[in-house]
Amino acid sequence: MKHTHLWAMALMTGTILSSCDHDWSARNVPDAVKVKFVESYPTIKRVEWDRVDSLYEAEFKISGRERKALFGEDGTLLSYTEEIEEQYLPKRIAAQLQQEFKSYKIDEVHRVQEGSLTSFVIELEKGTRDIWLRFNEKGELLDRSSNAATPIRKQSASLLPLSSSATTTDDLGTPELRWDLPPVLREVSGIGMLPDGNMACVQDEVGTIFIYNLDQKAISQEIPFAGPGDYEGIAVAGENAYIVRSDGTLFEVVGFRNTKPTVQVYEASFPATINIEGLAYDQEHNQLLLAPKGYDPKLKAQKGIYAFSLDSKKFLPQPVTSISLDQVQTPTKGKKQKSGYDVLQPSSLELHPTSGEFYMLDAVNNRLYVISREGQISKTVDLDKKMLRQAEGLTFGQDGALYIASEGSKKGKGVIHRYNNRL
C-alpha cells in the first residue's frame, strides 16, 4: 500500500472499536499495536479505535484536547495528530490563510507528526462548504481536499511519504554570536529570554536570578529569591519567574522585575533518583514542564516529562509525556554509560515557539534532541564539546533563534551561543 493513499483512506468511516482501562481482550486489535500504544501512552485509560484496511487509529485525549495515533499492523507508529489552537500556527501559514482564504472561518487546526516531518492540517468552512488544507512547517501547501455537501471526517493519516527512520542527525553549525559570561555565571544552569531582549539566568549554587544584558554584555540586575541550593532551570511566564531545584521544588518569584517581588515555594515529592534539571513554560496548557536527568524506576525503560499546573498550583501525579529509551541512539561520545537510563540525561528543556516540539539538551552525552509531544524523538544533534563544554541552558529568541548556555571549566567562563540554524 502506498503511504500517499493514507489521506483518502482516513476520510472513510472505519470499523469502530472502543476500550476502557486497556481492556483489549474482545477487540480486534493486533497485540503489537496494543503493546506499542501502552508503551507510548502509559497514562491513557480511555481510547477509541478505528480500523481502516490494515491500519489502526487510536483516538484519545490529553489535557482535554483530542489526539490521534495511527499504527501499522506490526505496531509501528506511523503518525500522531494533536488538536491545537489557531494562534500556534506558524506565522507563514497564518498569513497565507488571511490572504487567500479570508472569507472562510477556521474550524479546527491539527498538528501532524510523522517521523521527523511535521505538518499542519486546517479545516476551513463557509456555509455548507468545508476545505481541508495541509501545510508543511515552511508554510508550503502540500494538499487540499474539499466536500461541498458533508463535513469531512477528521483524520490523522499523513500525506507525506514516511521517512525510513524516526530519528535524523543534524548539525547546529557555527554559532553566529557568543557571549562570555562573568565569573558569577561560570556555572550557569538555566536561561530564559525576556520580552525586552535581556536574558534571565540562574546558576547552580546561588538563589539569585541574574538579568544579563546581551547588548551591554553585562549583568544589569540581580534578584535574590532563596538561599544557597542546587538550582537547575528557569522559566518565565508573564511577570513571574519560576526556578526549579534539583529535587523538583519550585520557586515562584511573583513580579520578579519589581522592586519587591514575593516568593512562593512548592515542595515536590519525586523519587530520590529523579534529579530534575529541565524546566519549561507550556503556555497552551498553562503549566510548567519538568525534565529529569535521573529516572523513575516505575517507568522502566522510559523517561517522563512531568507537569506543574499554574491553575491549581499542584504537581500532576503522572508524566504528561513518556519517552521510550529504546529509540535513543547510543552515544559514541561523552561519559561511559553506567545503566540503560544514562543514554538520555536531560539538562534543559524548552518548547519550540511555533511547532510546539520539545527541545531537550543532554549535557552528559553532548546532545540536543527534538522530541514530539507524544515522546517520539525526531532529530538528534551531536554538540561540539569544544564550543559547549557542558550545555545546561536552552531558550528561544523572539525571532526563533536558538540560545544555548554552557558552564565553563574551573579556569574558564560560562558562555551563551546564538544559533540561527533551523533544525
Image (cartoon, rainbow, N blue to C red):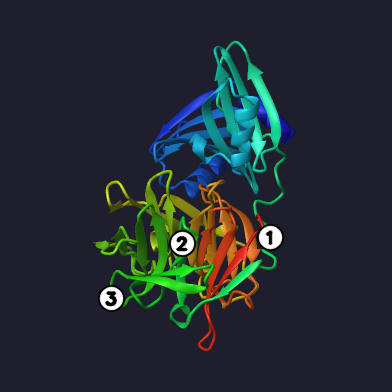
Quarter of the image that includes the C terminus: bottom right
Left or right, 11 with respect to 234, comes to right
- Location of residue 18 (image quadrant): top left
x%, y% of residue 94?
Answer: 59, 35
Name which of mark 3 and mark 1 comes first in the sequence. Answer: 1
Given the image, on which type of amino acid does mark 2 rest? Gly
Residue 91 lies, with reference to residue 201, above or below; the image says above
Residue 367 lies, with reference to residue 37, above or below; the image says below
Quarter of the image that includes the N terminus: top right
Residue sitting at x 69%, y 68%: 174
Q: Which residue is mark 3?
A: 227
Q: Element type at marker 3?
A: loop
Left or right, 101 with respect to 322, comes to right
Residue sitting at x 48%, y 27%: 17
Given the image, on which type of amino acid does mark 3 rest? Gly
- Which residue, as the protein is rendered here, is positioned at the far right? 2
Q: Which residue is mark 2?
A: 192
Residue sitting at x 29%, y 69%: 225
Q: Is residue 266 visible?
A: no
Q: How many residues crowd mark 1 within 10 Å: few (<14), some (14–19), many (20+)?
A: few
Name which of mark 3 and mark 2 comes first in the sequence. Answer: 2
Name which of mark 1 and mark 2 comes first in the sequence. Answer: 1
Q: Element type at marker 1?
A: strand
Structural distance between the alpha carbons of marks 3 and 1: 41 Å
Residue sitting at x 35%, y 72%: 208
Q: Nearer the viewer, mark 3 or mark 1?
A: 3
x%, y% of residue 28?
Answer: 53, 31
Which label number is shown at residue 169?
1
Left or right, 312 with respect to 161, comes to left
Q: How many residues crowd mark 3 within 10 Å: few (<14), some (14–19), many (20+)?
A: few
- Location of residue 259 (image quadrant): bottom left
Given the image, on which type of amino acid does mark 1 rest? Thr
